Amino acid sequence: MAFTTSTPTRLAAASAGLAVALTPSPALADEVSPAPTTVTTPAQSEAPETTKKRAPSAAQKRAQGKRAQRAAARERADRTRRSLVRVALNQKGDRYISGRSGPGAFDCSGLTKYVYKKAAGKELPHYSGAQMRKARRVSTKNLKPGDLLFYGRGGSQHVSMYIGNGKMVHATNPRSGVRVDSIHMGYYKSRFAGAGRLLTH
């Protein structure tokens, strides 16, 4: 090719055009540029959350201990109640004899005295009024088996023992002896003086 005075100019233009052609446009560069790859190292990965259990405080331990003691006391009381009912029902059909406290024959306070001694190891006086004074007063809505029911002024006339389901066991009179009756019987209901609890729970 013959060089003229314009040849260097044309070569420079051609080189510039080639450079432009070889330089990708911004749009094209976005299309062809590979997306950056994020590498997660073990140190960056999220560790599973661990729940740390706090040791109970001294106050919490004391509260737990008291709850356990109350639960154990209630369980002992429930066992004693079952024993009271069992012993009382075992006397069903025994004779009524004034002044007797068993075995085999009872008056009303003699029966409750015998049952509490045998089933719960508690010594009661042989008089219904005195038994009422030893008992903690409870309402008939909150009766539990083993609670005592008293009749007459100050509980002086009669005492029976509640056995659950609206029933009581008691030594009634020489004709009927020891038997089970409803606590709602008209004769006793009209003379009711109160109910008492001798167990702690």
Image: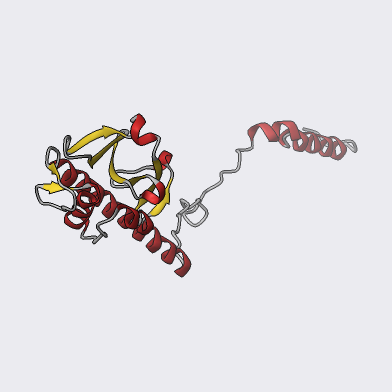
Q: What is the quadrant of the N terminus in the image?
A: top right
Q: Is residue 198 positioned above or below 33 on the image?
A: below
Q: Position of residue 122 (x, y in %)?
A: 24, 60
Residue 25, visible in the rendered structure: no
Q: Nearer the viewer, residue 171 or 49?
A: 171
Which percent across, then down, holds residue 67?
39, 58
- Direction from residue 200 to residue 122 in the image, left or right: left
Pinpoint residue 78: horizontal percent, then vertical percent.
27, 49
Q: Residue at x 35, y 52 (%)?
A: 197
Residue 1 seen anywhere in this rendered image of the structure? yes
Residue 189, image x and y in percent?
Answer: 38, 35
Q: Tell me if 153 is positioned left or right of 79 in this view.
A: right
Q: Residue at x 41, y 65 (%)?
A: 61
Residue at the (48%, 52%) spot, across then down: 49
Q: Residue furthest left?
A: 104
Report how many numbered discs are placed on residues in the image: 0
Give 1 or 149, whichever is nearer the viewer. 149
Residue positioned 18% across, 53% down in the render: 99
| Relative to 18, 47 lies left or right | left
Residue 160 is drawn in which quadrant?
top left
